[in-house]
Amino acid sequence: MPGYIARRIGGLLFIWFVAVLISFAALQFVPGDPILVLLSDQSGDAALEARLRADYGLDRSLPLQFIDYIGSIADGSFGLSYRFAGREVIEIIEGGMWITPLLAITALVIAVPLGVFLGIAAATRAGQLADTAIILLLVCGISIPNFALATTLVWLLSIKAGLLPVAGWGSFSQMILPVVVLTVPPVAYIARLTRSYMLEVFEKDYIRTARAKGVRDRLVVWRHALRNTLVPLLTSIGIIFGGLLSGSFVVETIFNIPGLGRIAIESIFARDYPVTMSVVLLFTVFYSLINLAVDLSYALIDPRIRLQGQSA
Amino acid sequence: MTTAAISRSDFWLRFSHSKNAVIGAIIVTIVTLAAIFAPVLAPQDPGKVSILFTWEPPGDRYTLGADALGRDVLSRLVWGARVSLLVAFSVLSITLVIGVTLGMIAAWSRGWPDSLIMRTVDVVFAFPEVIIALLIAAVLGPGTLTVIVALSMVWWPGIARMTRSLVLSLREELFVEAAVACGTPPWKIMWKHFLPNIISPLIVRASIGVGFIIMAEATLSFLGIGVQEPMPTWGGMIRDGLPELRSDPHLALAASASLGITMIGFNLLGDGLRDVLDPKGAR
């Protein structure tokens, strides 16, 4: 196990390095000269231009700039904004840094049990009307894009029924619609997986044995079958979390939530690329940490995984 | 893994018995026809601005009303299907060519090209999809090219990985050994022996992929970093209609419904094809 953990953490650090490298390269390739943009009206002022260039470290050689870039990430400032002269990127993004993970984790915490429950409900009624109804619901849940769903829900619940606020951030009632919109696709995805895993497990010998022993139906499902379903489900948590991060861009834009997703989109239009790249880095870190946690817990459960590749 | 090809009549028999596949195929056919014949079907020019009819509610003149610039919503929906499918078709073609080629090379060589290709795949997989799109949008600027490049970047590794694993098991087969023994060049083995044997899982993958790509394109266009005005896109129409939800809900809702139904169609067709072509691969 320690060897496996070391390998995985090595892989994680490599991915982070690649992410830093790519985001630095992207900053070199983005169109326009940030200093000229900052100067705007004062573009004739050579002294000011030289000072800004020095402040931003853009007068240094590329390798030195890269070292500066790593340093700015290490000290948590993430460099200087191209939009607000002299302001550190962290000042712009720190407000949103907790909102996006909070939304994603809330959605995940709701989606997993709900999805598993729906999946079991469908699997135990396979072929019946309830199963068909649930499957139909799941197809819709997976198919309908989150912004189309959000638009429809805002129209129905906020505008027509007046039950919930249209947008905004800060109160509990403002959190309901964003979380619902974020939760629907993962619920559908998890339920679908649970249903098919369950149906597979039901065919297994140990389930037949349990039934033959006279174990009550409910116990067979919730104890014997569910446990063996949860393990493969665990691996899909990473994919689901990735989907939630993408969902945050849409949901934060629609509901006017000042999270990282909206900050990133705004920064692209404002050409404030250091902000865009810092969100790229943060999301990569969130995503890779979740995947690491999933892999480690999976390896803990299943010895075959942690031994894999050891002999090779 | 059973990749044994099923006969044509067998395929249609199984296909017509799958409710998912049939309903999906009907929806997909309608959307595809709308996309192909958009210039004929659309009642008006989707870009025609008429300041006299801004915010026109659905009625005789405009079946589904008009938008903020007085453009016909129905025409824009029909043309939107064309844009969505064109992007999906481009991305799918690019990623199938790149993914299948690299996957085959990886599986055939098994040496450093394999390691290089598969490590690259792992790295791409390590990033959330939306992040790759964001990076490309920053460098290339928002636009149709950005969408196609970004989605191709995201989509090829899955196809490469799938092709590699399919070919790895195929190359142990006797007929491949025979072909090698006869001195058949590798490219010919790949083209004549591997490709026909991996085509059905690829079709399943592609049909599910179209849905994903349409959704992703709509999402990027919705966020404003995708296909740009004046080209009509469903994602863009929803974004433009959103602030008007109180007064003119038909703008955003019509596009939402088109997108939702199209997605359901492609997903049903994908599920159905998977059941028909690759029953073992069904999750």
Image: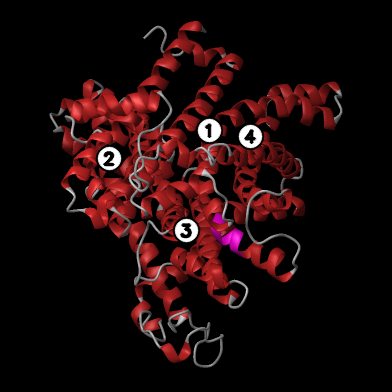
| Mark 1 or 4: the one toward you | 1
Viewer-proximal residue among B93 and A256 = A256
Up/down of A300 relative to A88, above or below: above
Label disc, if present, on residue A27 of the rendered structure? 2
Gap between marks 1 and 4, in whole Å? 18 Å
Check disc 4 and give the amino acid type: Tyr
Q: Which residue bears the numbered disc 1? A: A238
Mark nearest the camera among 3 and 4 is 4
In the picture of the structure, the residue carrying the numbered disc 3 is B12
Query: What is the chain letter for disc 2?
Result: A
Give the spatial CA distance, label 2 vs label 1: 28 Å
Residue B134 position, x and y percent, is 38, 46
Which of the 4 image quadrants contains residue B147? bottom left
Q: Amino acid at mark 2?
A: Leu
Whether residue B41 is visible, yes or no, is: yes
Q: Magenta region: which residues?
A: A145-151
Amino acid type shown at disc 3: Trp
**Residue at mark 4:** A197
Name the front one of labels 2 and 3.
2
Task: For mark 3, name the chain.
Answer: B
Question: Within 10 angstroms of label 2, few (less than 14), some, or many (20 or more) residues?
Answer: some
- Return the disc, 2 or 4, that comes first in the chain's sequence: 2
Q: CA distance from mark 2 to mark 3?
A: 52 Å
> Any magenta on residue B196?
no
Marks 3, 4 in one chain? no
